[in-house]
Every structure is written in structure tokens, then in C-alpha cells.
Image: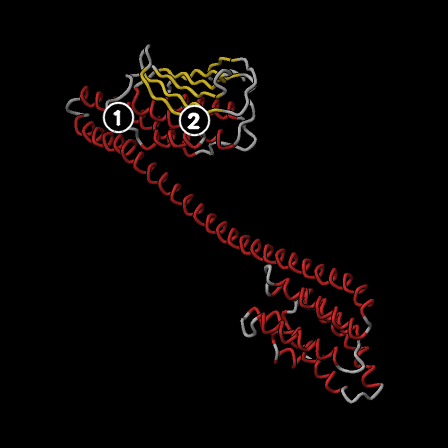
Amino acid sequence: MKEFIERFPAFKKISLTNASGLLAAVAVATPSLYDHFNLKNEYRWIALGLFFIFIFLLAIREQAVANRHLPAKVYLTIQTILVLSLLSLPPNHEFVIILFFILSAEATTIDPGKKSYLWIALYTVVTAIVFFILEGFQAALYSLPIYAGGYFFFGAFSASAARAEVARAESQSLLEDLSIAHEKLQRYAAQAEELAVSEERNRLAREMHDTLGHRLTVSIVQLEGAERLVDVEPKRAQEMVATVKEQMRAALSELRQAVATLREPLQADLSITNALKSLGQNFQVATEIEVTMAFAHNIPQLPNEYRVAIYRAAQEALTNIQRHAQAKKVRMSLLLDKKENRVDLTLIDDGIGLPEKADKLGFGLRGIQERAAQLNGIMRLEANPDGGAKICLCLPLPSMKENKTTTLKTGDSL
């Protein structure tokens, strides 16, 4: 049997429906052939050959028709002729008509559409003729509705099963496509994350080269000059050492700011207000710029993308203030606007105001603007009427609860 299956690989892929048809065909063939051989009917070998051909074609039908080795109409024609031949062989076993139930299901499966029911109509007519010849008019009249209903039921059921199988195959194919697309997206996301990390490293390298590196270079030059003048012009050497001291303090402040930027910005169990509070405290320690904070009371639990957008916006705004604003004080607030149904992050400094060409946003501010757009929000950068600059990130929320506002300074508890 194993060698037979290997020689005919089509048998490896027999579906449950096709197997059921084979079982039914064998069930019909067994009593018929038993009767033929028990009576030693002269047509017994013909009957055996006809049943064998019918069952063999039924077994290979799925692969033969699917691969177009055997057209559907040719297959159904051959099978119909085989059944008619078996019905015509003495002693004319009427139960061979059961094979038409199998062919009714086959017809709607391999030749779908309205035309497939013409085969069922043909089997109904043949059944009526067979019963009329063998049993008479009354038997044909009684049997016809039963067999006709059975043929149409099997045909309709098989058509539904075939459509369900096609839908399942399409769903499986779609699932495989989605899995492949998901894997590609994961790879792209990993690559994007690596690029983002690389860009951040490059940015920090440039930042430290332009700030810390510059101040260290100036300090070395000043110390070399002071070393040469310490005996000749001690007062001048002292002034140069004082300059180096100021440069070192500024360099230390910038180094602290860079280290604060490298720290983990958000923790999963840390609320956005606590994260902003920590950010403000670290900024004040690193830069000696006073930070006053005001947070709305009972800020609702925000989605992670909101928390990241708000934190990054505050981080970038503070960085710009430290680098460009020449400010002494910063006010940072996170408030709920009940009328507009949104949350507003605002940072106001008392520095020199907006720089020239403020309409041309830098990389960091463009990042804030893009994050806001992704959440259907906006970013506003404008001059503060009382001096300095003001930046606001406004993000709409689906629902807001009435909140109280709490104002605090660095070191106060939430």
C-alpha cells in the first residue's frame, strides 16, 4: 500500500469530504459485487472493473481536476456513464443510484455555479427513468421527490463546504502575509531604533565636542598662559586661573545636563507628573536655573504615547532654554483644559526671548511638532509678553475629569 501511495502521490492529499465519498462508494460497491460474484453473474468482472474505475477516479479527482489533467466536465461525464452502466447490468441493483448523491456533491464542488445544478437535474431525470423502467410509474412518482431533494441537498451542502474551504484558504494566506509583514515591520522597527540610538549618540558626541571640548580647550590654553606668567605677572596669572575656574564650572554644568539626558526618561510605573517633577529637579541641579512647576491634580492615566510625547517635549524645551535662552527661571505646567478637552504642557522662561529665524524649527522642536501631530495635537512656540519665550504642547484627550491645580516648586511634594 505504501508503494502504491508513493507511486500515486495524489492519494496523499485526500480531503475529509473526498474520503467520505470514497467510503460511500465502497459501501455501495460491496453488496453489489457480493451479489454478482455469489450468483456467478457473467457480468461480475465488468461490474468489478466499473466500480474500480469509479472509485479510482473519485480518489484522484481532487488533484487531477485541480491540476487540469482532467477537465471537470469530462470527469463528471465519465462518472455518470459508469453509474449508468452499473445500473444497466443485471440484476439491475437500484441502490447503485446512491452514487448519484456522490456525483451531485462532486458537481457543485468542481464545476461551481448555476450550471452545476444541470448535472443534478440530469441525475434526477435518470433516477426517474430507472425507477419507471424497473418499478413502474407509481414507484417512480413516489421516489422522485426523495431522490431529487437528496441530490439538491448534497449539491448545496457541498457547494457551501467548498466556499468555506476557499474562504479558509484565503484567510490562511492572508494570515501568512500578515505574519510576513509583521516580521518585516519588526525588523524595520529594530533598524529604526538602532538608527535613532545612533543619531542620539552622534548628537551627544557633537554636543560634548562643541561645549565641553571647547571649554576644556580654552581652559588648557589659559592654564598654560598662567603657568608662564605666574612668576612675571602673578595678578594676570590669577585672572587667567579665575577664568579657568569659570570655564570648569560651566563645563561641569553641561556635563551634568548631558548625563541627565542619558538617564532612562520614563518608567512604566511612574506617572507623568512624577516624571516631569524628576526632570525639573535634575535640570535645576545641573544648570542652577530655578524651575517652578504646576501640575493639575489627579491627571488621568495617559496612554504611553502621550506620556512619551509630553516628557520628550519638556526635555527638549528645557535643553533649548539652557542652551539659548540665558534664563534664570523656568515655569513648567501640565494642566487640563476642560472646555477644550485636552492636556496642555507649557514651559515659560525669563530669558532673551525668541531667537532670530524662530519660524525655522530645529531638529528637536520638529520632533515635538511631529509627536503632537501624531496625537492630533499642536505645538506652539511664541514670545512671552512678560519677556522670554513660551512653548506649549496641546494634546486632545477622549475624556477629561474636572481637576484641581496644584502649584509647587522643586523640592515640594506632589
Residue at left offset 63%, top offset 55%: 164
Above-or-below relation of 2 to 218: below
Indicate the position of residue 93 as horizontal and vertical percent values: 80, 77
Under mark 2, the amino acid is Gly
Question: Element at badge 2?
Answer: loop
For residue 261, say whether it is visible.
Answer: yes
Asked which quadrant contains residue 162, the reply is bottom right
Q: Residue furthest front?
A: 137
Measured as percent of width and height from the top left, residue 91 is found at 81, 81
- Identify the residue at horizontal 49%, vertical 14% (top origin): 408
Q: Residue at x 54, y 13 (%)?
A: 404
Residue 146 x, y percent position in the rendering:
78, 62
Q: Is residue 277 above or below residue 221?
A: above
Question: Depth check: 167 or 238 in front?
Answer: 167
Compared with residue 360, is residue 406 higher up or lower down, i.e. above or below? above
Residue marked by disc 1 = 244
Mark 1 element type: helix
> Is residue 260 visible to the viewer in this orientation of the structure?
no
Image disc number at residue 378: none
Residue 178 position within the rendered picture, expressed as x and y whole percent measured from the top left: 52, 51
Q: Nearer the viewer, mark 2 or mark 1?
A: 2
List the single residue furthest toward the right: 38
Look at mark 2 in the image and give the residue it sits on. 377
The picture quadrant where one finds residue 36 is bottom right
Q: Quadrant of the N terminus?
A: bottom right
Disc tally is 2
Classed neighbour count for the residue bearing mark 1: other residues with Cα under 10 Å, few (<14), some (14–19), many (≥20): many
Q: Amino acid at mark 1?
A: Val
Left or right of residue 295, residue 240 in this image: left
- Quarter assignment of residue 209: top left
